[in-house]
Image (cartoon, rainbow, N blue to C red):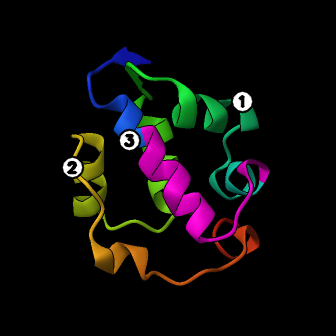
Amino acid sequence: MRKTKNANGFGAAIRALREKRQWSQPDLAHASGLSVVTICNVENKAGVTPQRATLNALRDALQIDPTEFEAMVQGDTVSDEQDQSEQAGPDNHRQ
């Protein structure tokens, strides 16, 4: 993980998107192929940003538009359009 000043906002945004879908951390871990510990670290550790592979797995699992996601990584907020995305179980995302 690399240090950045925007990670706390990013973790909160990931948590908000996960909760919007009514997913638990294990649900997101399953959908993304990441560990529950990694999901917990992303959501809770201020001052660090995950490696690109972790970011890509989260983006794909949460079905976030790449432009929107890059804005999140840079510390911007998620648009209302993204908040209106479909709620679906984690089994519908990764094969």
Which quadrant: the C terminus? bottom right
Q: Badge 2 is on which residue?
A: 76
- Where in the figure is residue 62, as x and y percent of width and height? 52, 63
- Where in the figure is residue 14, as x and y percent of width and height? 49, 50
Q: Is the residue under label 2 in contact with that under label 1 (CB below 8 Å)?
A: no
Residue at 61 percent of width and 62 percent of height: 19
Q: Earlier in the sequence, mark 1 or mark 2?
A: 1
Which mark, by number, is residue 46? none
Gap in angstroms between the C-alphas marked 1 and 2: 25 Å
Please state if 44 lies on the left or on the right of 8 as rendered: right
Tell me if residue 30 is in the magenta stretch: no
- Where in the figure is residue 26, as x and y percent of width and height? 78, 49
Residue at 26 percent of width and 55 percent of height: 77
Q: Badge 3 is on which residue?
A: 10
Q: Earlier in the sequence, mark 3 or mark 1?
A: 3
Residue at 69 percent of width and 76 percent of height: 92
Q: Main secondary structure of the magenta part?
A: helix
Q: How many neighbours does mark 1 have within 10 angstroms: few (below 14), some (14-19), or many (20 or more)?
A: few
Assign a secondary structure to mark 1.
Answer: helix
Q: Please give the range of residues in magenta.
A: 11-26
In the foreground, 49 or 83 = 83
Which mark, by number, is residue 37? 1
Residue type pointed to by label 2: Asp
Assign a secondary structure to mark 2.
Answer: loop
Residue type pointed to by label 3: Phe
Tell me if residue 12 is in the magenta stretch: yes
